[in-house]
Amino acid sequence: MLSKKEKQVMQFLYKKCKDKESSLIAPQEISNYLMPKYEINNIEVDQIINGLVLDNYIDVVHSDSKGKLIYCVSLKQKGAAFEREVKHNKKNLYRIILRTVILATLSFAIGAILRAIFF
């Protein structure tokens, strides 16, 4: 399971790479995308990218452009299915919340009926 920062980075990478075979992305682009919500530096970006590589979401080649680090990112099969996985997780969350509300309502109703019978 991905952490919040990893999900945000993966969402950014998915948006950049979903219609292409590969894409060139600078660590600063990732930092700027996450900036309003998360304070992140290039070392953390590199750690997150390496984690996504280990989890088989993406394939990365490190490159230099004018002395600056550039990632050449391509989505693997698991990375290409990232959007579907996010939708599936949201659907499961809604299903769990609905089930909890129904069970709480049912429990309250049974408790009220039993109180009316025995008291």
Image (cartoon, rainbow, N blue to C red):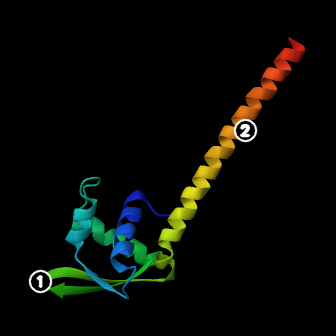
Say if mark 1 contacts mark 2, CB within 8 Å.
no
Instruction: Identify the image quadrant of residue 61.
Output: bottom left
Q: Which residue is mark 2?
A: 103
Label 1 or label 2, whichever lies nearer to me, is: 2
- Quarter of image, res 101: top right
Q: Earlier in the sequence, mark 1 or mark 2?
A: 1
The answer to whether any part of residue 56 appears in the image is no
Task: Measure the C-alpha gap from mark 1 to mark 2.
Answer: 60 Å
Q: Is residue 9 left or right of residue 101?
A: left
From the top left corner, tell me how far across and down residue 99 is, in percent.
68, 45
Look at the image and tell me whether residue 88 can be seen: yes
Task: Depth check: give the residue in front, 86 or 50.
Answer: 86
Q: Residue at x 41, y 78 (%)?
A: 53
- For this view, does 9 lie left or right of residue 30? right
Note whether 97 is above or below 7 in the view shown: above
Q: Amino acid at mark 2?
A: Leu
Q: Residue furthest right?
A: 117
Residue 67's disc is: 1
Tag shown at residue 110 = none
Q: Quadrant of the C terminus?
A: top right
In the foreground, 71 or 87: 87
* Residue at the image position 51 percent from the left and 78 percent from the top: 78
Q: Is residue 93 above or below residue 16?
A: above
